[in-house]
């Protein structure tokens, strides 16, 4: 069977299907052969000019041409797709050798770190870490701690009153002692520390801040004495500052303890040799403490003829200042992140 048109198209196909195409020319080619008026499509109307006995063979030839074109078209289209993908991957490739953008990481505040360290020491000795309100009632902050109205000790703790004389910002964390005992309902042992914010009407300077952190401690059980306090202080300060730290007790006076003491530790700056930091005494005063006053036990529901306890309280900033060699308490409340970060780095070295 010979058909001129068929032969012409076959020839044209052979020529066209060898070139290199982009998407546009490939689609133009599809229109050229298979479009509504495409060369292969038009062969369908040619069939009427074909002899009856050759119609079948002619139809098959047309199909062959169509398949040939479609195969070529599909193959090319896939090749182009792959090419495009490769190009895109190449363009979007990530150079892992380039330096990355610096992400600034957050870190715990140094004061918080010291407090956590202290908490860990006491947790390991079986203490609970408890909380109490910063807006406090006069009776917890003073009255039940054996500091009656008009007592001069109240002046020393120059207080922020909120509502008349009854509601105030706590001037110490000691009220949490009373709250914990009242909650304990006479049960023993009580072992707690309470880190928390306290407030006093002080003018801010290098060593004073109207808001500061205290850590209160209380232990109540049978036959508790000053020597238990001594042992506990030794554990705390050796864990914080090293095993060669010594403690010494000096008599003092607080309304809620009897006897009362000040706890000194070996100067962490000169190891006790004497320097400017310890005013050449070799010692630093860090804690107020004592044996819980019978009135305080009684006020809190514990019979002082059966139970006894020790209590202590200290400023967290002061310890953190020693640990990080900071000489201005305002550093902790400065919002300049660069300063906080400086200490972070020192800590990692
Ligand atoms: N609350 C005292 C203050 O702010 C510190 C203190 C002294 C706490 C003796 C105590 C203690 O628990 O027993 O100065």
Image (tube, rainbow, N blue to C red):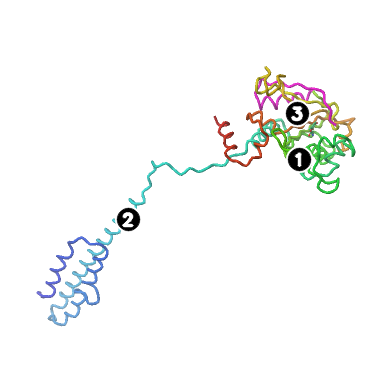
Cα distance between the residues tagged 1 and 3 = 18 Å
Mark 2 Cα-neighbour bin, 10 Å: few <14, some 14–19, many ≥20: few
Q: Residue 237 in the image: x percent, y percent?
A: 69, 26
Q: Which residue is mark 2?
A: 85
In which image quadrant can residue 213 be found? Answer: top right
Q: Which residue is mark 1?
A: 199
Quick check: is the Cβ at mark 2 less than 8 Å away from ligand 1?
A: no
Nearer to us in this view, 161 or 175? 161
15 relative to 191, above or below: below
160 relative to 221, above or below: below
**Which of pointers 1 and 2 indicates the residue nearer the eye?**
1
Q: Earlier in the sequence, mark 1 or mark 3?
A: 1
Quick check: is the Cβ at mark 3 less than 8 Å away from ligand 1?
A: yes
Q: Quadrant of the C terminus?
A: top right
Mark 3 Cα-neighbour bin, 10 Å: few <14, some 14–19, many ≥20: many
Q: Residue 180 in the image: x percent, y percent?
A: 80, 39
**Which of pointers 3 and 2 indicates the residue nearer the eye?**
3
In which image quadrant can residue 1 be found? Answer: bottom left
Q: Which residues are magenta?
A: 227-254
Nearer to us in this view, 330 or 40? 330
SS category of the residue bearing label 1 = strand
Cα distance between the residues tagged 3 and 2 = 71 Å
Residue 287 marker: 3
Q: Earlier in the sequence, mark 3 or mark 2?
A: 2
Mark 1 Cα-neighbour bin, 10 Å: few <14, some 14–19, many ≥20: many
């Amino acid at each position: 069977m010979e058909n001129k048109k068929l032969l012409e198209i076959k020839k044209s196909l052979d020529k066209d299907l060898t070139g290199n195409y982009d998407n546009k020319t490939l689609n133009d080619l599809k229109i050229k052969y298979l479009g509504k008026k495409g060369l292969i499509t038009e062969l369908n109307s040619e069939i009427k000019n074909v002899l009856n006995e050759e119609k079948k063979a002619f139809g098959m030839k047309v199909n062959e041409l169509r398949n040939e074109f479609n195969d070529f078209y599909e193959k090319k289209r896939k090749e182009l797709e792959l090419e495009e993908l490769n190009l895109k991957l190449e363009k979007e490739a990530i150079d892992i050798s380039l330096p990355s953008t610096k992400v600034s990481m957050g870190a715990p505040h140094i004061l918080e770190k010291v407090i956590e360290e202290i908490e860990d020491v006491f947790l390991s000795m079986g203490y609970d870490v408890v909380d109490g309100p910063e807006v406090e009632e006069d009776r917890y902050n003073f009255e039940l701690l054996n500091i009656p109205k008009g007592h001069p000790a109240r002046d020393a703790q120059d207080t922020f009153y909120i509502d008349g004389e009854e509601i105030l910002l706590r001037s110490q964390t000691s009220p949490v002692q009373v709250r914990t005992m009242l909650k304990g309902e006479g049960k023993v042992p009580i072992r707690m520390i309470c880190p928390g914010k306290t407030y006093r009407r002080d003018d801010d300077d290098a060593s004073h801040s109207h808001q500061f952190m205290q850590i209160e401690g209380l232990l109540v059980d049978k036959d508790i004495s000053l020597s238990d306090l001594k042992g506990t202080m030794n554990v705390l300060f050796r864990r914080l500052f090293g095993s060669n730290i010594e403690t010494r007790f000096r008599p003092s006076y607080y309304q809620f303890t009897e006897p009362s003491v000040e706890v000194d530790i070996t100067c962490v700056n000169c190891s006790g040799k004497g320097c400017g930091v310890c005013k050449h005494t070799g010692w630093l005063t860090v804690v107020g403490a004592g044996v819980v006053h019978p009135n305080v036990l009684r006020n809190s529901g514990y019979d002082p003829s059966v139970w006894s306890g020790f209590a202590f309280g200290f400023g967290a900033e002061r310890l953190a200042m020693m640990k990080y060699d900071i000489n201005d308490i305002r550093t902790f409340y400065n919002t300049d992140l660069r300063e906080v970060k400086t200490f972070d780095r020192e800590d990692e070295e």
